[in-house]
Amino acid sequence: MATGLLTRIEGAITRAIPLNPIQSRLTQALASISFDDIPFSAARVGAPILERAEIQGTFYVCGGHTGETFEDRAQHQAHDLLALHQAGHEIGCHTFAHPFVTKLSDTARDQDRQANANFIRDTLGDVMMTSFAYPYGAVSLAAKAFYARQFFTCRGVYRGLNSGRVDFSELRAIGIERRQHDIGEVRDLVAEAKERNAWIIFFTHDVGPDPSDYGCTPQNLEDVITTLKDAGIETLPVKAAAAKVMFG
């Protein structure tokens, strides 16, 4: 109980201290759709759904999971990463080994970051990952400070929209997850994003008819895309969207 309370307090303090605040220059709402870990189904089912809608997303990769199974879900293969990159999707960093980064020293964080960068260079060539997502959504001030120095943007899992003074060291996001997905709530959030000229970032993991608690069905993903299109909101990869937030 005490440990859980301390973790919640630490998370609240961390979220309250923006380490890379950017004043948004958006004059209209913007959206991004992202996938964490890149399970096999995210690459083989999720990406084609985006492509049919003429949308490019951000896929946060853990190089240490390539060709492996993680949390009982088959993960991507190396050639999936190449296909995603060639289709114009952004490849972002989700660490190499998917650790709780809050429990690592800066030296260990940097070793893991470099391992993922080396993996991507060996797999995709001259590709530099500039977008990061925290594994498990775990963030501390020390971890936030480290990754904010290494990446253009860092995305968390704390629910919310990004508007006004946007913290690029811990971007807010909306999960498209079996355990909590509510398309009615998504429509309300999209409408709010449009009213506030906010950047709304969606994330999920696997995509299939029987997804994990952290994944979604193809219909869930299609419903989110339809909602964004009906609202007239442009959807871009995180890197491109962040540039618009910063520069207009």
Image (spheres, helix red, strand yellow):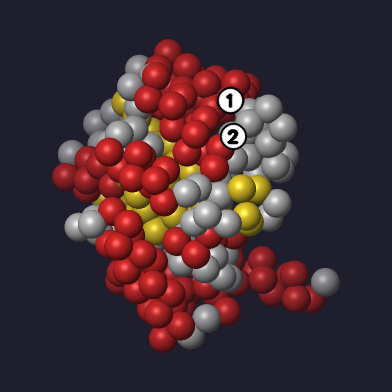
* Outermost residue, left side: 247
What residue is rendered at 47% in x and 38% in y? 43
Question: Is label 2 in contact with label 1 (beta carbons under 8 Å)?
Answer: yes
Q: Nearer the viewer, residue 141 or 209?
A: 209
Q: Is residue 171 left or right of residue 5?
A: left
Kind of residue at disc 2: Val
**Which label is found at residue 44?**
none
Q: Nearer the viewer, residue 183 or 44?
A: 44
Mark 2 or 1, nearer chain start: 2
Q: Nearer the viewer, residue 121 or 203?
A: 121
Kind of residue at disc 1: Pro
Q: Which quarter of the figure is the C terminus placed in?
A: top left
Q: Is residue 141 left or right of residue 5?
A: left
Q: Position of residue 236 (x, y in %)?
A: 31, 34
Q: Kindly identify which residue carries mark 2.
A: 207
**Which label is found at residue 218?**
1
Q: Position of residue 58 (x, y in %)?
A: 38, 43
Q: How many labels were placed on the picture? A: 2
